[in-house]
Image: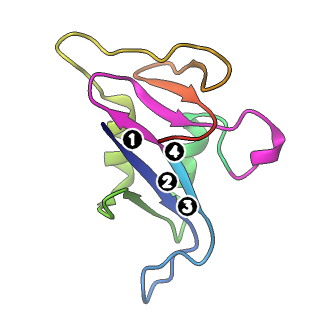
Amino acid sequence: MGTNYYLHTDVCEHCGRSKEEVLHIGKSSAGWCFALHVRQGTWEEEIPANLTEWQSKFREPKVLIKNEYDEVIMPDEMNDIITKRSHPEGLGRHDIDGQYCIGRGDGTWDLCIGEFS
């Protein structure tokens, strides 16, 4: 069980709804490195390719970060969820298989593609 996080773009200042697309940031699961959703090819240009690009998107005007329970997450909190993870028994890493996980981040996140559940 885990929690998915989303970046809502072009958020209306009056109603708070996203006028454009909602981008999946990734998934946090207890005991695992954060599964950061990244693009692998040019067909997903709206998805960032790494954490640095995501961090830039977190700070763009008219964006809002929410989890799957519709709770608002501040940019610094989202960064901490991704980069400051721990578990008493250590964090599990996703298998680099090229189908779901394509690499490791420099810290407590893995670079993942495709569909998330």
Callout 4 crowding tier (Cα within 10 Å): few <14, some 14–19, many ≥20 = some
Magenta segment: 26-46
Q: How many marks?
A: 4
Q: Amino acid at mark 2?
A: Phe
Q: CA distance from mark 4 to mark 3?
A: 9 Å
Report the amino acid beneath label 1. Answer: Asn
Residue where numbered disc 1 is placed: 79
Contact? badges 4 and 3 (CB < 8 Å)? no
Quick check: marks 2 and 4 in contact, CB under 8 Å? Answer: yes
Q: Residue at x 57, y 30 (%)?
A: 112
Do callouts 1 and 4 mark residues in contact (Cβ within 8 Å)? yes
Sequence order check: which comes first, mark 1 or mark 4? 4
Q: Answer above or below: position of 61 versus 91.
A: below
Q: Which residue is mark 3?
A: 60
Q: Around disc 3, counting alpha carbons within 10 Å, would you say few (fewer than 14), some (14 to 19), or many (20 or more)? A: few
Q: Mark 4 highlights which residue? A: 55
Place residue 64 in its image quadrant. bottom left
